[in-house]
Amino acid sequence: MKEEVAQIIDANLNRVREGLRVVEEVARFVLRNEKLTKEIKAQRHKLAALFKNQELIKFRDTKKDLGKYKDFDDSSYRNFRETVQRNLSRSQEGCRVLEEFSKLFSKELPPKVKEIRFNVYELEKTITQLISKATE
């Protein structure tokens, strides 16, 4: 795997896992929904397991990462729903990047990442509905 592709995979794998972790905490502490919390955690772990043998960390170069100092997000979230939405979107976009770039070195990974991406779409629907009910 080329160094640049490995860095793209590593950055997006982190992005997806971090985004899902934020959503998981909302499911756990705000919604207090054990089933949803477990499902989000399962997707996060499933994704990590897909890439565990790729030795991505050796390609990580945070000192040269151009995005490290950029503030790409407006940090003024107004509520739990917006926090969840932004982190789900981040996770979905990261999954799409993982899906596309894993095609460069694997035939098995892209469909598995795609499945996770679609699972995150379903999680979005579920958690959005639950937050709407909880905040009514």
Image (cartoon, grey):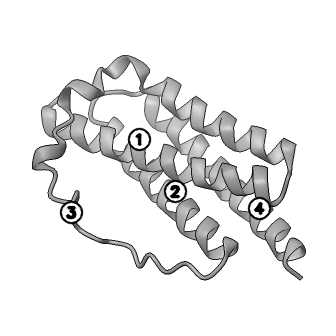
The residue to which callout 1 is attached is: 13
Quadrant of image for the N terminus: top left
Residue 59 x, y percent position in the rendering = 18, 30
Q: SS at mark 1?
A: helix
Q: SS at mark 4?
A: helix
Residue shown at the point (28%, 27%) measured from the top left: 56
What's the CA distance linking mark 4 and mark 2? 14 Å
Q: Indicate the amino acid at tag 1.
A: Leu
Say which label, 3 or 1, has the lower sequence index. Answer: 1
Give left or right: position of 26 versus 136: left
What's the CA distance linking mark 3 and mark 1? 19 Å
Give left or right: position of 95 versus 8: right
The residue to which callout 2 is attached is: 92
The residue to which callout 4 is attached is: 127
What's the CA distance linking mark 2 and mark 3? 23 Å
Disc number lying in front (3 or 1):
3
Residue 85 x, y percent position in the rendering = 61, 69
Residue 48 x, y percent position in the rendering = 50, 30
Q: Are marks 4 and 3 in contact (CB under 8 Å)?
A: no
Disc number lying in front (4 or 2):
4
Say which label, 1 or 4, has the lower sequence index. Answer: 1
Q: Residues within 10 Å of mark 3 (few under 14, many from 20)?
A: few
Residue shown at the point (35%, 27%) measured from the top left: 106
Q: Indicate the amino acid at tag 2.
A: Gln
Q: Residue furthest top?
A: 53
Quadrant of image for the C terminus: bottom right
The residue to which callout 3 is attached is: 69
Q: SS at mark 3?
A: loop
In which quadrant of the rendered view does residue 98 lie? top left
Q: Is residue 134 above or below residue 62?
A: below
What's the CA distance linking mark 2 and mark 1? 11 Å
